[in-house]
Amino acid sequence: MTHASETAPASAAAPLTRDEVAHVARLARLGLDDDELGRLTAELGMILSYVRQLDEVDTEGVEPTTSLFVPGAPLREDGARAGLDRDEVLGQAPRPLEGGFGVPGFVEG
């Protein structure tokens, strides 16, 4: 049986640091104060600890999941349905633009 911890780099088992959480928060453009940063560091650390426990599960002989389809699950018929009124929806948009939604640019070319 092979565990993920046997193939993962040693740093994968290290606790999550406050600096790492701050770095991810900056990448996500989240403005966290010191209290939030401390709380999230602890909470994310607990989540990662729980996920690491899954390394201990014996998965020998278990086929990898290739689909989330569950045979026998109730499915609704796929068909055309009436949508929302365009003018009503665009009337509630913060920046309607040329019959659609105006969004800030994020790729400069």
Image (cartoon, rainbow, N blue to C red):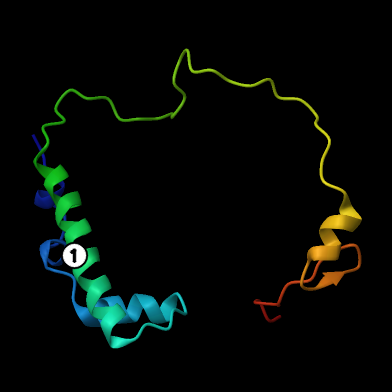
Viewer-nearest residue: 99 or 9: 99
Instruction: Specify the amino acid type for callout 1.
Output: Gly
- In the rendered image, the vertical position of residue 22 relative to residue 75, given as above or below: below
Left of 22 or right of it: where is 54?
left
Q: Secondary structure at mark 1?
A: helix
Which residue lies most toward the bottom here? 34
Using residue 98 as the reference point, say whether residue 30 is left or right of it.
left
Residue drawn where x is 44% and y is 29% of the image: 68
User: Which residue is denoted by mark 1 in the rendering?
Assistant: 45
Tell me the residue at 86%/64% (across/down): 91
Quadrant of the image for the C terminus? Answer: bottom right
1 to 9, vertically: above or below: above
Q: Position of residue 12 (x, y in %)?
A: 16, 62
Q: Residues within 10 Å of mark 1 (few under 14, many from 20)?
A: some
Query: Residue 96's quadrant in the figure?
Result: bottom right
In the picture provided, is 77 more to the left or to the right than 19? Answer: right
Q: Residue at x 31, y 81 (%)?
A: 22
- Where is residue 37 shown, x and y percent of the image? 28, 80
| Position of the N terminus by quadrant | top left
Horizontal and vertical percent position of residue 106? 65, 77
How far across and down, in percent of the image, does residue 19 sit?
24, 83
